[in-house]
Image: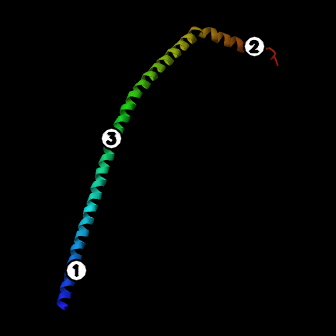
Amino acid sequence: MSAQNSAGIQTLLDAERDASKIVQKAREYRTKRVREARDEAKKEIEAYRAKKEEEYKKFEAEHTQGNKAAEEEANKEADDQIAKIREAGKKNQDEVINDLLEAVFNPRPEPIAA
């Protein structure tokens, strides 16, 4: 009976050892799959990010060109207005200087209406 018990115990120990190996292999496989899934997810995220970045750059380029044209037009108009103002200033410069000198050297006091 002792030999039978010993053989039975040995069989149980062998089965437990085999089960332990199977569990260990399953854990290693699971860990490996988690790493692979994480790497795949990182690649997908990076591809998605690159795609969206490209879409944004395209959108920005399309809309920036319209803004640049409007900005250039506004700058041209402002330059034209400045040139007109300078031209008018040069045209009437002598008259304005004379009026200023007249006002400074020959003041005409007037009462302020309250």
Q: CA distance from mark 3 to mark 2?
A: 74 Å
Q: Position of residue 90 (x, y in %)?
A: 56, 11
Vertical comparison of 61 with 5: above or below: above
Q: In the picture, residue 11 is in which quadrant?
A: bottom left
Vertical comparison of 65 with 105: above or below: below
Q: Nearer the viewer, residue 27 or 81?
A: 27
- Residue at the image point whose x is 49% and y is 17% from the top: 77
Quarter of the image that includes the C terminus: top right
Q: Position of residue 45 (x, y in %)?
A: 33, 46
Q: Position of residue 59 (x, y in %)?
A: 38, 31
The disc labelled 2 sits on which kind of residue? Pro
Q: Nearer the viewer, residue 89 or 46?
A: 46
Q: Nearer the viewer, residue 39 or 76?
A: 39
Q: Position of residue 111 (x, y in %)?
A: 81, 15
Give the residue at mark 3.
Answer: 50
The disc labelled 1 sits on which kind of residue? Leu
Q: In the picture, residue 12 is in which quadrant?
A: bottom left
Q: In the picture, residue 62 is in which quadrant?
A: top left
Q: Nearer the viewer, mark 3 or mark 2?
A: 3
Vertical comparison of 12 with 103: above or below: below
Instruction: Please give left or right for residue 102 compared with residue 110 in the image.
Output: left
Give the residue at mark 1.
Answer: 12
Name the element at disc 1. helix
Q: Which mark is residue 107?
A: 2
Vertical comparison of 46 with 8: above or below: above
Instruction: Please give left or right for residue 8 compared with residue 84 in the image.
Output: left
